Amino acid sequence: MQPKAFLFDMNGTMIDDMHYHEKAWFDILNNQIGYPISMADTKKQMYGKNEELFERLFGTEKYTNEEVAAWSLMKEKKYQQVFLPHLQLIKGLNHFLEKAQQHKIAMAIGTAASPFNVNFVLDNLPVKKYFDAIITADDVATSKPNPEVFTKCADILQVSYNDCIVFEDSPKGVQAALNAGMKAVVILSYHQQYEFDHLDNIVLFINDYTDARLNDLLL
């Protein structure tokens, strides 16, 4: 496969921050909201938009939209404060983005993160120049595994879905790529390889972007 576009998830894929999100949610749910949940179950619930997480845990009646937004903002501020000293690209990514751009591969970000968190990352790391599209939680009706976040990226780039490779760290994200008819590269920053056994659209598992096998995608 000679891809024409790379579509990147952000959290856990461009930056290694998922454990910080997990701890922030664990603290908010247990110590602020008073909802007893284990760290393992917190991890299981950490996908999609924040409001979708609240709906899975509490239904739609317990909290108003304004209350959900307030809790979400508190969580994001807690995450950002703790993670900021550690904010950096996953090893090798900046060089990989540069090489992809030199090979005229179109690139976009497709993430379930809010604009508040996307701006936190892109305002602090010099990579915005590589991306011709950025799709966030506010731009889609339903989060991954719904493929909308990636199909919107491809549509903006004007690249066929089967000419895209998605870079993801989560099974839900890889499922979204599969649902869009796209292949995926998995970054093993937060999940274990066996968690992807049910997905057949994966071309590579990598630990970081220094993996020499990525060069085969740039030919």
Image (spheres, rainbow, N blue to C red):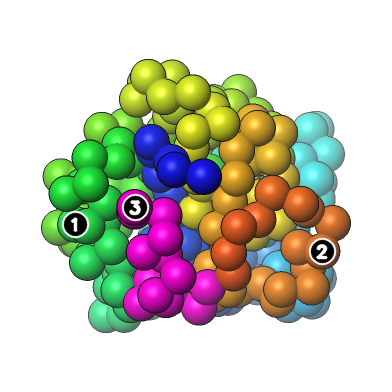
Give residue 197's mark. Answer: 2
Q: Position of residue 12 (x, y in %)?
A: 49, 65
Q: Position of residue 139 (x, y in %)?
A: 46, 26
Of the residues under marks 3 and 1, which one precedes in the sequence?
1
Residue at the (76%, 40%) spot, across then down: 55
Count the labels in the image.
3
Residue at the (46%, 62%) spot, across then down: 13
The magenta stretch spans residue 209: yes
The vertical placement of 180 against 144, above or below, is above
Quarter location, residue 4: top left
* Residue, disc 3: 219
Left or right of 117 on screen, residue 84: left
Q: Amino acid at mark 1?
A: Glu
Q: Amino acid at mark 3?
A: Leu
Residue at the (36%, 64%) spot, across then down: 215
The magenta stretch spans residue 128: no
Task: Report if the CB atoms under discs 2 and 3 are less than 8 Å apart.
Answer: no
Of the residues under marks 2 and 3, which one precedes in the sequence?
2
Quarter location, residue 106: top left
Residue at the (43%, 19%) spot, across then down: 155
Distance between the alpha carbons at the discs numbered 3 and 1: 14 Å
Let me know if residue 94 appears in the view. Answer: yes
Of the residues under marks 2 and 1, which one precedes in the sequence?
1
Left or right of 53 on screen, residue 8: left
* Residue nearer the viewer, 58 or 192: 192
The vertical placement of 159 against 54, above or below, is above
Q: Which residues are magenta?
A: 206-219
Q: Position of residue 79 (x, y in %)?
A: 44, 67
* Residue, disc 1: 98
